[in-house]
Image: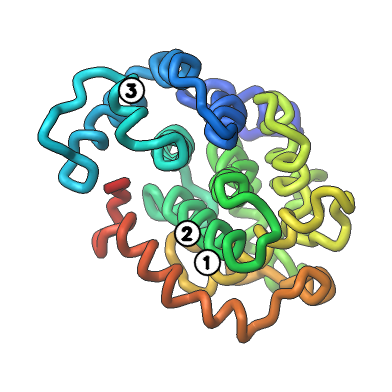
């Protein structure tokens, strides 16, 4: 595979990856409604055979099953509820994209998926306790926050080796090294991907600004900072963290402004770890239920 030479090349190369999570914005909008449209949800889920199968299988799992078996998507939606359904869809669609074989950040297969899921769980936990964002929105933002890194790893191998060899001797952060070597960084790639897939502006802001939320638009800064805090905690926990995770600087000013403190983040860790262990087995396998 040839090396990517510019941002547009990276975006074009990643178009070939199957099952990009482009239907998530529509699913999120439906899931957040006061009364989800079962017909619309069924139509969207039916667009992806693998997702439709996962929905029915999960509805009939021991965790959700009742005496009567669900044999169609509409019944499965009613049993799971729109919030649970959305979590399953988001994890299934994004996870399938993120486990595509890549190298360049020191990842083992599936590491970025595991790490993104941990960030999503941290974000959802903080959203409930801090009330900075809707929990489903925070969960989604955590899942997609670093898609640009995956795209770079998928599209450009040699340049990432060059970046890794120059950090930390020449640069304080991985992002600085990306800019110096590539002329753009993974956050710009995430922004381009999310724009192409039609994600709302708040998610685009997360993808672009989460490394330094102080620079985010005021309307989106609370969510961006929440993901920044979630990233910090998830990195500390170590699930799926690549070599880039060792070169990450917290934006202390943004965290203080949003009301985060180390004590509060540490206090949330037991709940976060308990949730992570429900979804990620000791062998690193991801399961929904």
Element on which disc 3 rests: helix
Q: Residues within 10 Å of mark 1 (few under 14, many from 20)?
A: many
Query: x, y percentage for residue 163?
Result: 67, 56
Residue shown at 25%/34% (left/top)? 59
Query: Is 65 on the left-hand or right-hand side of 17?
Result: left
Relative to 266, residue 50 above or below: above
Q: Nearer the viewer, residue 155 or 70?
A: 70
Specify which label sits upstream in the sequence, 1 or 2. 2
Could you say which disc has been placed on residue 234 in the image?
1
* Label 3 neighbour load within 10 Å: few <14, some 14-19, many 20+: some
Give the CA distance from mark 3 to mark 2.
24 Å
Residue 1 visible in the shown view:
no
Q: CA distance from mark 1 to mark 2?
A: 6 Å
For the residues bearing labels 1 and 2, Cβ distance under 8 angstroms: yes
The image quadrant that residue 274 belongs to is bottom left
Q: Residue 281: give x, y in percent of width and height.
A: 26, 59
Count how many numbered circles sit on residues in the image: 3
**In the displayed structure image, the side of residue 214 where residue 114 appears, left or right:** left
Q: Does label 3 or label 2 sit earlier along the sequence? A: 3
Circle nearer the viewer, 3 or 1: 3
Tag nearer the camera, 3 or 2: 3
Residue extending farthest to the front is: 35
| Residue carrying label 2 | 118
Work out whether residue 133 or residue 48 is closer to the camera in this orientation and state it. 133
Disc 3 from disc 1: Cα separation: 30 Å
Q: Answer few, some or many: residues within 10 Å of disc 2's Cα (few below 14, many 20 plus, some between 14 and 19).
A: many
Q: Which residue is labeled 3 in the image?
A: 52
């Amino acid at each position: 595979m040839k090396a990517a030479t510019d941002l547009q090349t990276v975006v074009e190369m990643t178009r070939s990856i199957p099952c990009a999570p482009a239907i998530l914005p529509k699913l999120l909008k439906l899931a957040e409604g006061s009364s989800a449209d079962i017909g619309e949800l069924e139509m969207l889920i039916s667009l992806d055979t693998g997702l439709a199968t996962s929905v029915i299988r999960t509805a009939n799992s021991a965790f959700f099953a009742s005496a009567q078996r669900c044999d169609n998507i509409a019944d499965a939606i009613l049993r799971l509820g729109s919030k649970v359904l959305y979590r399953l869809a988001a994890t299934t669609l994004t996870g399938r994209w993120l486990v595509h074989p890549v190298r360049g950040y020191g990842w083992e297969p599936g590491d970025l998926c595991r790490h993104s899921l941990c960030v999503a769980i941290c974000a959802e936990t903080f959203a409930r306790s801090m009330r900075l964002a809707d929990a489903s929105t925070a969960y989604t933002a955590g899942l997609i926050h670093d898609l640009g890194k995956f795209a770079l790893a998928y599209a450009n191998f040699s340049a990432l080796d060059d970046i890794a060899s120059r950090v930390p001797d020449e640069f304080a952060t991985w992002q600085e090294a990306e800019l110096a070597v590539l002329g753009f960084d993974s956050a710009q790639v995430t922004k381009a991907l999310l724009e192409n897939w039609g994600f709302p502006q708040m998610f685009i802001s997360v993808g672009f600004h989460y490394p330094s939320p102080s620079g985010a638009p005021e309307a989106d800064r609370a969510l961006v900072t929440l993901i920044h805090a979630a990233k910090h905690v998830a990195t500390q926990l170590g699930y799926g963290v690549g070599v880039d995770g060792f070169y990450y600087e917290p934006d202390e000013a943004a965290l203080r402004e949003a009301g985060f403190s180390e004590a509060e983040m540490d206090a949330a860790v037991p709940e976060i770890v308990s949730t992570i262990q429900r979804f990620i087995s000791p062998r690193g396998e991801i399961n929904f239920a």
